Structures are given as structure tokens and as C-alpha cells.
Image (spheres, grey):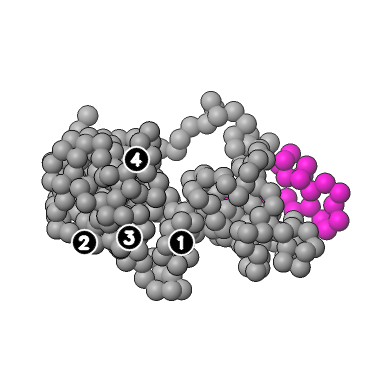
Amino acid sequence: MDIVQPPESSARLQRSVAACLASILELDVTEVPVPQDGHPDPWTVWRNWLLQRAVGLVPIADPAGFNWPGPWLALLRAADGNGQVGAVAFGAPPGIAWHPLGGPETFEALEEGYLIAPADVALWQREQQPAARALGTVEAILIAPQAEGTLARVEQAAARAGRGLEGDRYFDQRGTFSNAHARGHDLTLIEGEVLDELTLPSGELTPEDARRNIVTRGIDLNVLVGLPFHVGDIECFGQRLCEPCAHLERVTEKALLRPLIHKGGLRADVLTDGEIRVGDEIAPLSS
């Protein structure tokens, strides 16, 4: 998701929605049509333009409860009560990741939501990721016994297949998102490089603030989605990206949603029992 400069002309709905579409689709904002102020049907203009790219706007029935690890278009009630403005929402649970016009509207002003989706998912292909930074190490291990509890660093932790790290809230199904039927809750990882580079108005993001089990160094975690890998002698499987959400913002009281999009780390299953230690190697398993 790119951050773009909103168009300077037209009404605030048209300007903000055009900026949101450009951001979500990672296009130059000049490529997005901006219907003139007073246009009788700006949404038809945008829908026709999106169809040229084989995507469309899908109305979200319950946008306030829409848990989605990707960006979507949120329409907020304008603070002055006169119409709506567009913003980019993200997360599970969701929150506002970017407000193009920088107004005072918050997620509580949400009135409508739209997902930008391919017209035919069978024709959609996942972008191939480069195999850069394929080897890393464990820089830190953190566990918390209860949901929303303070994370503590340890030098090593016992890992159990299908459960995660002993002493952590998800090991005994006590985590905020624990679900006995879900996958990807055994182990969470985040790159130390992301924490190093992240700058927030409220200061740095510590490993404890990130609320992931393992801080890594040297490896690109995003490329491990859908792949088996090892942490020391433990075999794991990368289920999906560990995207940021409104819950993380609430617990940390830091604006993390936008800076951590696609940089929040990895959710993984633990496949074998053993010990994970600081300094252990992390790498994909050979096929």
C-alpha cells in the first residue's frame, strides 16, 4: 500500500477516494479518474475504470466487523456532517491505516466499506517473491502467559507441535485470537530489521511492543508463507503473514497499522517438538 498525494481539484469525496484507490492499487494518483465536483454518479466512473484492470468494488455487508488482512476502502461520515470522505482500512480487527485528507474522522465514523477484488479469482496469480535473504538467526524469544500480558524475553523455550512455545498464552489456547480449529497461532515471528527501521511519533517499537514470539535477523520472513522451514532443530510451516491490526494498536497505544502493513512478520505452525534458542539458525527446508 503506497502513500500518495491526493488530487488537488474536485470535492473531498472524489479526492479522497481517488487517493485511496491509487494507494491500494499502488498506482500513481494521476492514473485514477477524479470525477468533477457535482458529478451525478462518480462511483460508475470508478467502477468502469477498475473493470479495465479486471477488478471491481465489492460492497462489505458489515464493514465495522470486517476482519481482512489487506487494505480496503472505508467511507467515513465527514466530521462536519456534510457527506463522506474516503480512507484506507486494514486489519483483523480493522482500523484506519491511512486518511488521505488527514481529517479528524476516525473508524467510529465508518458508514460503508468496499473491497477491491479481481473479477475472476481463478485468473489471479500470486506474485512470485524473490528468494533474497534466505538464511537468518533467532535474535530474541518472547512469551506472555496471558492475552494482552507483558511479554518477557527468554534465552530458550520448549516448542511443541501443534501448540507453540511452553509458557506462552497461545500454548494453552489463552491468546486473544486462540481458536482450536485455526492454523498459524503456534508461533509468530518478526524481522529485527523492521523494528530497527520503524519510526513512530511515539518512539521506537520494541520487541515487547511487537508482541511476536521470535525476533529474527537476516531472513526475509514474507517468502516463507506456504513453505516449510526450520528454527534450529524445530520444523515449522509458514501459514500466512502476521499483519498488524487495530487490537495491536490498542494494546500498545501506538499507531502501528500503516507502518507494519506487510511487514508485521509471519504466522507459523510448529510441526515437531524440541527447543528453540537465541542464536538458532532459521532457513527454508530443502525440498
Q: Element at badge 2?
A: strand
The residue shown at (60%, 50%) is 64
Tag on residue 249? 1
Residue at 63% in and 37% down: 55
* Residue indicated by mark 4: 184
Q: Earlier in the sequence, mark 4 or mark 2?
A: 2
Q: Residue at x 79, y 48 (%)?
A: 42
Question: CA separation, marks 2 and 3?
Answer: 13 Å
| Neighbourhood count class around disc 4 (C-alpha, 10 Å): few under 14, some 14–19, many 20 upward | many
Q: Position of residue 82 (x, y in %)?
A: 80, 63
How far separated are the C-alphas under marks 2 and 1? 21 Å
Q: Nearer the viewer, residue 68 or 223?
A: 68
Q: Earlier in the sequence, mark 3 or mark 4?
A: 3
Residue 30 belongs to magenta span? yes
What's under tag 3, amino acid-wise? Answer: Gly
Q: Amino acid at mark 2?
A: Arg
Q: Amino acid at mark 4?
A: Gly
Q: Amino acid at mark 1?
A: Glu
Query: Tag 2: Cα neighbours inside 10 Å, few (<14), some, or many (≥20)?
Result: some
* Disc on the earlier residue, 2 or 1: 2
Number of the label disc, if any, that sits on residue 153: 2
